[in-house]
Image (tube, helix red, strand yellow):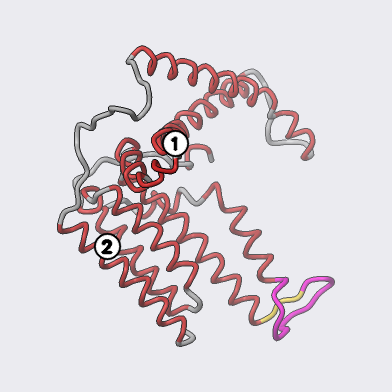
Amino acid sequence: MLKDITLGQFFPGSTIVHRLDPRTKLVLLVGYIVALFTARWFVTYGLVLAFLLLAVGLSRIPPKTLLRSMKPLLIVIVITGLLNLFYTSGQVLVQFWIFRITREGIVAAALMILRITMLVCGTFLLTYTTSPIALTDGLELLLGPLKRLHVPVHELSMMMCIALRFIPTLMEETDKIISAQKARGADFETGNLLRRAKAMLPILVPLFISAFRRADELATAMECRCYHGGEGRTRLRQPRFLLHDFLALGLGAALVAAVAILRTMGL
């Protein structure tokens, strides 16, 4: 299960999605999320899904990679779907004990599952096609105007970059610790919930120690390289908007406008 957590991983490539400016991809992600939460019915959801499939196809990221990333969230998706299925008022189709299934509940559960799945896939696609450094630079440039309000934009962007970068590292470290504990006879799969929670202590303690050790090593390495924040910092590659960036932004704006119009029409 831990190996299926691919958030923060970057798959290098030369596709048009990889070549997009990181600011473009961040703005497109925001527009995609707005369109996704604005969608009301299957027509608008289908339009957003078509946009996602187009982005996945152009990025050449294997669909099985995106679907595999959904495994750790499967329980959350199922619980959310069941809550919408059983507790949405409307025309009752089946009722037993305190649960009832309505026609509106079935539709709400299907749309909610579709929304969460598309939201996760779109977010993961951003990290798959954008390196952490490029993502940090794009976020810092987008939030640049907030520097006038003395907001530590560079520090916030750097923390986000480091957090994303260390997610795969921590998952790998956790997998090694679990394998080592199992080799010593630890059992994580039997017993009640309380026993399983106690069995996680031999994993959490060394994991926290390893995380703090890596953080200390990273801080020492940054200090040895005379890192002192964003003041006077230069970039090897200056991000700039090209023609395909403007075309992508136009496509994203058209998606948001189309979903908003279709929503007013009840679709």
Could you tell me residue 35's position as x and y percent?
A: 43, 68
Could you tell me residue 59's position as x and y percent?
A: 27, 53
Looking at the image, residue 19 sits to the left or right of residue 259; the answer is: left
Label 1 Cα crowd, 10 Å radius (few <14 / some 14-19 / many 20+): some
For the residue pair 219 and 89, the one nearer the viewer reads as: 219
Secondary structure category for the residue under label 1: loop
For the residue pair 63 and 161, the one nearer the viewer reads as: 161
Q: Nearer the viewer, mark 2 or mark 1?
A: 1
* Rendered-image quadrant of the N terminus: top right
Looking at the image, residue 217 sits to the left or right of residue 243; the answer is: right
Q: On residue 115, which mark appears?
A: none
Residue in the image at 64% along x and 26% along y? 204
Q: Which span of residues is magenta-colored?
A: 86-99
Could you tell me residue 171's position as x and y percent?
A: 50, 32
Distance from the alpha carbon under mark 2 to that under mark 1:
27 Å
Q: Earlier in the sequence, mark 2 or mark 1?
A: 1
Residue annotated with mark 1: 152
Q: Does residue 105 belong to the magenta stretch?
A: no
Residue in the image at 47% along x and 42% along y? 4
Residue in the image at 39% along x and 41% along y? 147
Secondary structure category for the residue under label 2: helix
Residue annotated with mark 2: 249
Label 2 Cα crowd, 10 Å radius (few <14 / some 14-19 / many 20+): some
Q: Amino acid at mark 1?
A: Pro
99 lies above or below 172: below
185 lies above or below 110: above
106 lies above or below 249: below
Q: Amino acid at mark 2?
A: Leu
Residue in the image at 72% along x and 71% along y? 87
Could you tell me residue 47's position as x and y percent?
A: 37, 74
Residue lying at the far left of the rendered structure: 243
Q: Quadrant of residue 13?
A: top left
